[in-house]
Every structure is written in structure tokens, then in C-alpha cells.
Image (cartoon, rainbow, N blue to C red):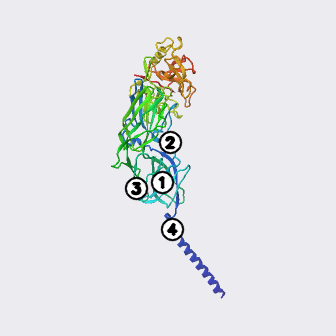
């Protein structure tokens, strides 16, 4: 009996272990047969900001070499020109290098604009084949990180937003390839993002979103520092602006319905007077035109009243433009030469050479003999042909090419003589024995203006200061990366020497000084100077 009982216990234990093993194997088999896709996982959406993309040059033809900009000089009077530039201000293209008021060409700094608080946006997920999965609508708040809960797999994510806080009506719940919608009137800052991504289980899935503005934006700026304040500005319009546009949600491509008609759009101005007038942004549907136009009914500056029209502009879809009207002196006649109305600047955004809007402003800094300015980001201490361009005279590259050049030592010596105590261009309006040179801030009060030297007048010319040559004390970089002690206190200008070398015009003094502190010396090849050009 005892033996039988023990055998029964062994058999019972055996069968128990056997059944448990079978159950475990079955359970494991079942787990392996269960698709991992049946689990759910979270996708976090990181809203990194907005931009206008960086594909301006690839989209169409331009009127300047490789720049995407339209550039024109319009004579306003016998003394002043208007330099007009329509530049694409796309974030990565335009901000890759910036010309500053006091500095020169800066290092590349791609810029993103944060999504404005209160922006309405939608996030939609589609399968890899384009079948609808889900979508959610949101209103943006600071630091917001929305989430979608999805089955692991391959997806196409679409994010749309509207800076005007009114999204167009979109039926997301259909195949992605079928979703097209019309937008009537260009009054919406519509933004778009698309990215394919594999959503994986067991880890954090993050989608980094940079929204691209799809509709063209234009801002008009008018800078009249060279002559005085704008008295009034008449109605300004831009053409063409089509009445409707069609958006494909699958790729963000734009097209124009046959019913869309061409018209114009008005600019509005937050301020319509002052030396710098800036319009509010306007959105347009230009249909990739190369025959766009902008017109200002009447511009009144001082005793000048004149309409302005700019034709044959390239206006591409999805580009942010800044239209700049900058008044500059056509030339200041003194010392038997015509001097540029401002110091030489180079704009890397559109590869353009020109002059500062006012002779009160700092220009770029130039090494002797090079055609690109010194970089001020700490990487360009001395002259370097790989950075500072080809050999030559950068003045000669101001449009139209060959119109301007570096002044010579002989010409500056003549200017000093003619404005000296006994010079023919000394009006002796204050003192019979002093030169017609005066050190002062540009507007005499010092507010918002720089120190420099006037030529052709004893004392500060006051309201007539725009009529006189003023060389700002922007100093120089003497083989250094950090601003030296001369900047803001001395004038250092590059000249071409009579024997083919390079010379320096040096000026110094404090506000109120008679301009005796002036001399000509040898230029250092590793120093970077300001340049004031003369007419050929």
C-alpha cells in the first residue's frame, strides 16, 4: 500500500509539471504569435518654430547673379537717388550672413521664428500608403508638447498651422492623396510640415516640427536718413495678387484654380512719417511671376513730392520678401571730386556692393587690395584671400560696375588743401584762420549719431548736414579680432597710393574740435579700414 501511494504521488507530480510546461510553451507561443503592432505607443510633437525655407534660388530666375534679388537705382533729384532692392528674406538664406550698422559681415546664424502663442494648428497621421489614421486640433501655448497615441509602424505626419489663427477647412478623414483645398484671398499665414517616421514600441518617439510658411509675404521699408523725414506716403500697392490658391496636403504644393483672377494688394503702414517707414506685412498669391510691380502714389520728403513705380519684379510663391527703398546722395561734390554719400558696404545676402544709407553710419571694414570685407566673427584677424575675396578695388563693384573707385592719396591731399585755412572751398563762415573742417556728432546733439569730421564748413552744418561730406569715426581693426580703441574715436580710411601702394587717411578729435587732426600715412596690409569711394 505504501509503495502504491508513493507511486501515485510521483505520477501526480509528473503530470502537474508536464501540464505546467505545456501551458508555459503555449503561452510563449501565443505571445510570439501576437503582433507587436497591437500595442500602443506615444509620439511627442516638438514644435521647433517656423521659417520660409531656404530654396529661393532653386525656384526661379533672378535679376542678379545667383542672389534671388531685384536691384535698381532710380534717380530722384539731381542730388539724390533711390536704391531699390527686393530681397528674399528666407531665414537660412538671408540670415546666413548679415551686414550690421556698425560691424560688417557676421557669421552664419540660421534663425527660426517661434510659433506665436494662440496659433491654431492641426496634427494628422496617415499610414505609409496614405490611409487616414487620426488627427487632432490644438491651440498653441508656451512649452506645449502635444502627443499622439499610435500603433507602432510607418506613418506620414502632417502639421498645418495658421498665423492668422483661422485654419482653412480641411477634411482630414480621407486618403492623403485626395486632400486638396482652396484658400480664398491672401490674408492667411498658412504653414505646413510633412515627415515620414517609423513609430517604434518601447521607446520615446519624438517628431521635431519646423513649419514652413507657404504663402508669399512682403514688407516694404523706406529709409530716408540721407535727406530727412518722410512727410507723407501715398497708397502703396503690389501686383499681382491672385484671388485664390489651391493647396495639396500630401506635399504642400500650390496651384492656381482657373477661376483665380489677378489683382493688386494695398500696403498699410504702422508709421507713415519719420526717417525709416516700415509697412505691415502683406500676404499675396503671386503665381511665380517675373513681371510683378510695386507703386507708391506719392512720396513726400521735404520739398520733394514724387510717385514711384518699380516693375518687372520676381515674386515667387512661398517666399518672404523685404522691399527696401533707400535714399542716398547721388554724390557730394567737394575737393574737385564727387564722393559717395556713405561708406562702402557689402551685402552677402544678394552679393551686392553699395553705400550706407547715411554718411553717419559705419560701413564694412576692408583689407587693402581685397574685394570682400573682414569677417567680424573672430575667424578673420588678418587678410586672407580665401575669406576676403579676389584682389581688386571693391568700390568698382558698386552697381553700375566701374562707376566708383578708391580715392587716391593725391585726391585726399587736395581735399585737405582746399578745405584748409586758405583753401578755395573754405567759406570762412566762423573764423578767417581756421580750416573748413569740424569734428562733431552728426546731428550735434549726439543722440543716435556718431562722431566724425565735416568737410567744407566751419562748425556743424545743422539742418544742412546732408549737403556736406562727413567722414564718420568708425576706426579700424589693426590686425585684431576684437574692436580696437580707435572705433568710435578716430577715422581710418583706405586710399590708393600714387605709386600703386595703399595709404591711410587718419582723422581724430573730440566733439567741437576744429579739424586740424588729419593726416595721411602708410596703410597696414593686415589692418581693415573704412572706405569712402569717389566717382570715376
Q: Can you tell which mark lies on residue 111?
A: 2
Q: Nearer the viewer, residue 362 or 247?
A: 247
Q: Earlier in the sequence, mark 3 or mark 1?
A: 1
Point out residue 365 in the picture as x, y percentages from the top left corner: 50, 28
Point out residue 251 in the picture as x, y percentages from the top left corner: 41, 51
Q: Residues within 10 Å of mark 4 (few under 14, many from 20)?
A: few
Q: Residues within 10 Å of mark 2 (few under 14, many from 20)?
A: some
Q: Nearer the viewer, residue 394 or 188?
A: 188
Q: Secondary structure at mark 3?
A: loop
Q: Does any portion of residue 348 appear in the rendered image?
A: no
Q: Nearer the viewer, residue 240 or 230?
A: 230
Foreground label between 3 and 4: 3
Foreground label between 2 and 4: 2
Q: Does any portion of residue 415 appear in the rendered image?
A: yes
Q: Residue tagged by mark 1?
A: 122
76 sits left or right of 471 in the view: left
Q: CA distance from mark 3 to mark 2?
A: 31 Å
Q: Nearer the viewer, residue 296 or 396?
A: 296
Q: CA distance from mark 3 to mark 4?
A: 39 Å
Q: Earlier in the sequence, mark 2 or mark 1?
A: 2
Q: Residue tagged by mark 3?
A: 179
Foreground label between 4 and 1: 1
Amino acid at each position: 500500500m505504501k509503495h502504491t501511494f508513493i507511486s501515485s504521488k510521483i505520477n501526480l507530480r509528473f503530470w502537474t509539471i508536464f501540464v505546467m510546461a505545456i501551458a508555459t510553451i503555449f503561452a510563449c507561443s501565443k505571445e510570439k504569435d501576437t503582433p507587436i503592432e497591437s500595442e500602443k505607443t506615444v509620439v511627442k510633437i516638438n514644435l521647433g518654430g517656423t521659417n520660409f525655407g531656404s530654396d529661393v534660388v532653386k525656384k526661379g530666375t533672378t535679376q542678379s547673379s545667383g542672389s534671388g534679388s531685384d536691384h535698381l537705382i532710380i534717380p530722384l533729384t539731381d542730388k539724390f537717388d533711390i536704391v531699390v532692392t527686393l530681397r528674399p528674406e528666407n531665414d537660412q538664406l538671408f540670415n546666413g550672413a548679415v551686414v550690421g550698422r556698425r560691424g560688417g559681415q557676421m557669421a552664419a546664424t540660421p534663425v527660426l521664428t517661434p510659433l506665436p502663442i494662440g496659433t491654431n494648428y492641426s496634427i494628422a497621421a496617415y499610414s505609409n500608403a496614405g490611409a487616414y489614421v487620426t488627427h487632432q486640433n490644438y491651440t498653441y501655448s508656451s512649452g506645449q508638447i502635444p502627443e499622439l497615441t499610435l500603433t507602432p509602424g510607418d506613418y506620414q505626419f502632417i502639421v498645418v498651422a495658421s498665423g492668422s489663427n483661422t485654419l482653412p477647412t480641411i477634411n482630414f478623414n480621407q486618403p492623403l492623396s485626395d486632400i486638396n483645398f482652396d484658400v480664398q484671398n491672401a490674408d492667411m499665414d498658412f504653414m505646413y510640415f510633412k515627415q515620414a517616421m517609423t513609430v517604434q514600441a518601447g521607446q520615446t518617439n519624438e517628431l521635431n516640427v519646423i513649419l514652413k510658411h507657404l504663402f508669399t509675404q512682403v514688407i516694404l521699408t523706406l529709409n530716408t536718413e540721407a535727406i530727412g523725414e518722410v512727410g507723407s506716403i501715398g497708397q502703396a500697392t503690389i501686383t499681382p495678387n491672385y484671388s485664390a490658391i489651391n493647396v495639396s496636403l500630401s506635399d504642400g504644393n500650390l496651384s492656381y484654380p482657373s477661376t483665380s483672377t489677378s489683382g493688386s494688394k494695398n500696403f498699410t503702414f504702422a508709421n507713415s512719417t519719420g526717417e525709416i517707414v516700415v509697412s505691415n506685412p502683406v500676404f499675396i498669391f503671386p503665381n511665380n511671376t517675373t513681371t510683378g510691380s510695386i507703386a507708391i502714389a506719392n512720396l513726400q520728403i521735404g520739398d520733394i513730392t514724387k510717385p514711384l513705380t518699380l516693375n518687372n519684379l520676381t515674386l515667387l510663391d512661398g517666399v518672404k520678401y523685404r522691399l527696401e527703398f533707400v535714399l542716398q546722395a547721388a554724390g557730394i561734390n567737394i575737393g574737385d571730386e564727387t564722393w559717395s554719400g556713405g561708406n562702402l558696404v557689402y551685402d552677402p545676402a544678394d552679393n551686392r556692393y553699395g553705400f550706407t544709407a547715411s554718411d553717419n553710419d559705419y560701413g564694412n571694414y576692408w583689407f587693402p587690395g581685397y574685394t570682400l570685407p573682414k569677417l567680424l566673427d573672430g575667424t578673420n584677424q588678418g587678410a586672407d584671400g580665401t575669406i576676403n575675396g579676389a584682389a581688386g578695388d571693391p568700390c568698382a563693384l558698386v552697381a553700375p560696375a566701374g562707376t566708383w573707385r578708391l580715392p587716391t592719396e593725391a585726391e585726399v591731399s587736395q581735399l585737405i588743401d582746399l578745405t584748409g585755412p586758405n583753401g578755395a572751398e573754405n567759406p570762412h563762415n566762423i573764423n578767417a584762420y581756421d580750416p573748413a573742417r569740424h569734428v562733431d556728432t552728426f546731428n550735434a546733439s549726439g543722440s543716435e549719431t556718431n562722431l566724425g569730421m565735416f568737410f567744407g564748413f566751419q562748425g556743424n552744418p545743422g539742418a544742412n548736414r546732408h549737403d556736406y561730406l562727413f567722414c564718420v569715426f568708425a576706426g579700424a581693426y589693426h590686425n585684431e579680432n576684437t574692436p580696437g580703441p580707435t572705433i568710435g574715436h578716430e577715422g581710418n580710411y583706405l586710399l590708393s597710393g600714387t605709386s600703386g601702394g595703399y595709404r591711410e587717411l587718419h582723422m581724430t578729435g573730440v566733439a567741437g574740435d576744429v579739424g586740424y587732426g588729419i593726416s595721411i600715412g602708410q596703410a597696414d596690409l593686415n589692418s581693415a579700414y573704412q572706405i569712402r569711394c569717389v566717382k570715376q
